[in-house]
Amino acid sequence: MPWWPFIMSSNRLAGPGPSNWISQVRRRSSLLSSRIEEEGFSEQEMSYVKQGEDALQKAISILSEQDGWTVETVAPNGDKVLSKVLPDIGKVFKLEVVMEQHPDSLYEELVGNMEQMGEWNPNVKEVKILQKIGRETMITHEVSAETPGNVVGPRDFVNVRCTRRRGSTCFLAGMSTQHPKMPEQKGIIRAENGPTCIVMKPCAEHPNKTKFTWLLNLDLKGWIPKTIVNKVLSQTQVDFANYLRHRMADNVSAEMAPAC
């Protein structure tokens, strides 16, 4: 995962997936980029920028729809995962939690320290930035860890990522793409992320805390029953929130430790 964690499952048996939507966005962004003049950016770079923007807008549109969500799981601490099925991209999952840190601190960890995610998220083997385009767009390659018992083996992803700020709210969006530096690798399945986005904004009652929402849509290209898909996705989102909490707590402890 990226700044979204890796999920070991697939929507292949659960109905439509994001592949068609991803292909449409890539084609559309390629056509549009040829008509956009942006000093310092090539047509291919502008295509990546447009893909990231499309993923962000699609994710915001999905999150703005309050109706039709089904509760998948609620953790004892109140962390919640909901889901709904959309006709164009299949099933999406939404994690809703409150984090003790301000959005700026979480943003720095998830974006500024992105390549360190494997240090604290057991679902991640590696995150590597392949290319940066300006300050708000990048292409990344991620490799996931296998699930316990190797029910699902490692997957890899190539994603375009888009970061935006609107006032005090941070958006971290993305989707699968292709990049010449990272063709499909022998011996590992290339999975796909549909429109995926983390939204972080200060809590109204406690401005130094964060309302953290993570929209997830992906297809890991396997053949896993729908019931297992739903269970694994929900639990992994909850686990990610806890891994991130531990990471942020460790960061605070390190900052407070006396210098030798």
Image (tube, helix red, strand yellow):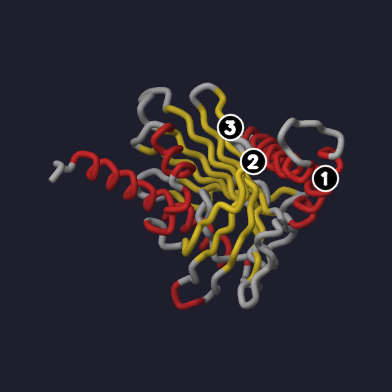
* Residue 176 at x, y percent in the picture: 67, 53
Numbered circle sitting on residue 142: none
Q: Nearer the viewer, residue 1 or 158?
A: 158
Q: Are marks 1 and 2 in contact (CB under 8 Å)?
A: no
Instruction: Classify mark 2: residues with Cα within 10 Å, few (<14), some (14-19) or many (20+).
Output: some
The answer to which of marks 1 and 3 sits earlier in the sequence is 1
Looking at this view, name the residue that lies furthest to the front: 40
> In percent of the image, x 76 and y 43: which residue is there?
47
Above or below, 4 relative to 224 = above
Q: Which mark sits nearer the N-terminus, 3 or 2?
A: 2
Residue at numbered disc 1: 30
Residue tagged 3 = 164
Find residue 133 and name its label: 2
- Which callout, 1 or 3, points to the residue nearer the camera? 1
Q: CA distance from mark 1 to mark 2?
A: 16 Å
**In the rendered image, is residue 119 in sight?**
yes
- Quarter location, residue 223: bottom right
178 vs 84, nearest the viewer: 178
